[in-house]
Image (cartoon, rainbow, N blue to C red):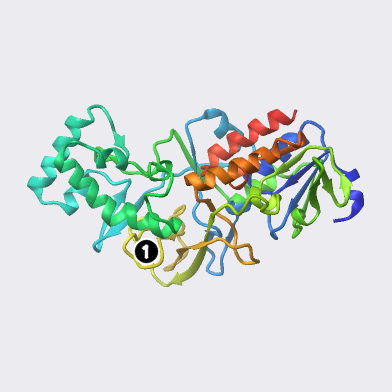
Amino acid sequence: MEMESNKIFDILIVGSGLSGAVIARESAEKGKKVLILERRDHTGGNMHDHVNDAGILVHDYGPHTFHTNDQKLINYMCRFAKWQEYRLTCGAKINGQFTPTPFNFATIDTFFSKDKADEIKLALGREYPGKSMVSILKLLDSSITCIREYARFLYDNDYSLYTAKQWGISPTEIDPSVLERVPVRLNYDTGYFEDAYQVMPEISYNDFFHSLLDHPNIMVKLRVDANDDISFKKNKMFFGGEVLQKPVVYTGAIDELFTYKHGRLPYRSLHFEWVIEEKESFQEAPVVAYPQAEEYTRITEYTKLPLQKVGNRTAYAVEFPVDYQKRDSAEPYYPVITAASQEIYMRYREEVLRYPNLYVCGRLGDFRYYNMDQALKRALCVAGEIF
C-alpha cells in the first residue's frame, strides 16, 4: 500500500462484503472519501456469485437468500437492485428418504407408523397450543414420552450428526443458539424461513454490489491484505507506518487483526465440489442436508436457486466443512461459538475499545452467526455510530 493513501481517504474500510460495502456507501453519501481494501479478487464477500461454464448462476461460497421482517431493511436493499420474491425450500435425506426442513408433520408421517404419528402430532398440539414452531432443545426436554422419542429420533439422525460435521465439535459444546436456528414445525407448512420478505436479486448479487459501491467517493483496491499495513503500538493505530486517527472499519476476523495475541478464535471453513450434470433435476429441493453422509453436510442445486432453465442440465455444489487455517484457498465462514471461544472473543473486544477510531463488525469481526439482514442492520448501526 502506497504511503500517500493515508492522505487520500477520510475512512478506511477493510473488507467489501455486505457490512463493509454498506458502511462505505453510507459514508460516501455523507461526503466522505472512502478507501476499501479487499484481499480477495472480487467484492461482495461470501455473497459473490458468477455464471459458470454451463450458463448457470451459482453462489461461489454457498447459498444466499435475503430474508427479513424489517421493511426498512428490504427498502434499503431495493435502492441498489431489483429483487424477486423467492421462498427457499430445504430438506434432509434420512435413512434414504427425503423430508422437508424445518421438520414438520410430514416428517412424523414419513418415519413413524400411522398410529404413532397420530399420537405424536396430537401430543404436540396439546403441549404447545397456538405455537407453529418449537426448538429441538425444548422437545428433548419435554415431559411427554412420545414427544421426547420424536425429538430423540431427529437429534440422533440429523441434528447431532449434522452439527458434529458442520462445527467439528460435539453438539454438547456448541452454543444452544446454533441448534435453535432451525426449529421444528408443529404443522404441515413448508419453507425454510417465516420472514415477511424473502427475496433474491433479479440479476445477481454481483450486480447488487456493483450498484452499492458505485459512488465517486468510494475507491476499492482488490488483492490487498490490510493486515500487512495495520499495526498497534502504545494504544495508537498505525497504517503503513503512520499514525492513523481516521475512522477504520474492520470486517475481517478480529483475532487476525490483533495478530492472535489472545489466542486463535475457531472458525469453520468450507470446501466445495462442483458438479454439472446432463439432467433437469438432481434432488428434491434447492438445498438438501445429508446428515448421515460420512463427510459432506449438504448439497445446493443452483438451477433451483432461483429457478433457472438451462437446457437439460443442472449444477450443484457438495459442501464439506473443514477447520479454518489461514491459507490462500480458504476463507473463514462460521464462528464456532462456545463458552471458551466467547471468553477469547471478549478479550479482543476489550482491545478494540482502546482505539476510539476503530469499528469492528460483520460475522467475523463480531464473532456472531449473522443472517444477511442482521449483518445489514448492524452495518447501518455502525455507520450511525461513526457519524
Q: Quadrant of residue 294?
A: bottom left
Q: Quadrant of residue 376?
A: top right
Residue 8, image x and y in percent?
A: 89, 44
Residue 279, image x and y in percent?
A: 38, 69
At horizontal 48% and vertical 69% (from top left) the residue drawn is 273
Task: Return the residue nearer the eye: 26 or 156.
Answer: 156
At horizontal 78% and vertical 57% (from top left) the residue drawn is 228
Residue 280, image x and y in percent?
A: 38, 65
**Looking at numbered disc 1 in the image, what kind of residue is underneath it?**
Ser
Instruction: Name the residue beneath numbered marker 1.
Output: 281
At horizontal 18% and vertical 47% (from top left) the residue drawn is 149
Task: Return the residue nearer the eye: 267 or 61.
Answer: 267
At horizontal 76% and vertical 53% (from top left) the residue drawn is 226
Q: Which residue occupies the extreme bottom position in the image? A: 278
Task: Return the residue nearer the eye: 326 or 4.
Answer: 326
Q: Is residue 236 left or right of residue 260?
A: right
Whether residue 81 can be seen here = no
Image quadrant containing the C terminus: top right
Q: Is residue 262 above or below residue 69?
A: below
Whether residue 119 can be seen here = yes
Image quadrant containing the N terminus: bottom right
